[in-house]
């Protein structure tokens, strides 16, 4: 199986997937850490793919999404975005709406706490 097939299989066989540098328990860059932190705090079940472990996957995911940076979040097979987009969607409530529309379980109170903490800044 080539990298594209592996990526397609991962994206379509998991409800939520984060292609990231490192793992959800040990992110290896700040951007990956931020997105994983949001998902972890919100209690979202997701597959994590460490692009540092496989150069073909690291390049392949950029080609697959036509998006140049990592992390990359997929929900129900669809590319959602990278760190900046996920941060904006979290703060605006759009990520909640997306999860609700796609039937992805998450902690609504945790999502609210993230927004409240950022409003205080």
Image: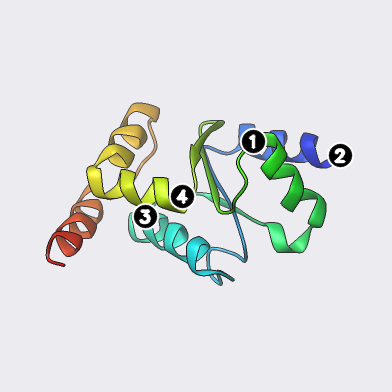
Position of residue 54 in the picture relative to residue 69 (left or right): right
Which residue is disc 4 drawn over?
A: 45
Residue 23: image location, x then y, percent: 59, 64
First in sequence: mark 1 or mark 2? 2
Compare residues 44 and 54 and report the one nearer the observer.
Answer: 54
Q: Which of labels 2 and 4 is toward the front?
A: 2
Q: Establish if 119 lies above or below 17.
A: below
Which circle marks residue 87 in the picture? none
First in sequence: mark 3 or mark 1? 3
Which residue is disc 3 drawn over?
A: 43
**Residue drawn at (34%, 27%) of the image:** 101
Which residue is disc 2 drawn over?
A: 2
First in sequence: mark 2 or mark 3? 2
Query: Please, which residue is most extreme toward the front here?
Result: 68
Label 4 residue SS: loop
**How much space separates mark 2 and mark 3, taking CA atoms?**
32 Å
Tell me whether circle 4 and circle 3 mark residues in contact (CB < 8 Å).
yes
Label 3 residue SS: loop
**How much space separates mark 2 and mark 4, taking CA atoms?**
26 Å
**How much space separates mark 4 and mark 1, taking CA atoms?**
25 Å
Query: Please, which residue is most extreme toward the top here?
Result: 101
């Amino acid at each position: 199986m080539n990298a594209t097939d592996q990526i397609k299989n991962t994206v379509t066989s998991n409800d939520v997937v984060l292609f990231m540098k490192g793992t959800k328990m040990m992110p290896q860059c700040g951007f990956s850490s931020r997105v994983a932190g949001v998902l972890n705090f919100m209690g979202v079940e997701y597959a994590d793919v460490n692009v540092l472990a496989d150069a073909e996957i690291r390049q392949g995911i950029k080609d697959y999404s036509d998006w140049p940076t990592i992390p990359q979040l997929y929900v129900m097979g669809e590319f959602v975005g990278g760190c900046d987009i996920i941060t904006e969607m979290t703060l605006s409530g759009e990520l909640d709406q997306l999860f609700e529309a796609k039937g992805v379980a998450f902690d609504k109170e945790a999502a609210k706490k993230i927004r409240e903490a950022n409003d205080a800044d």
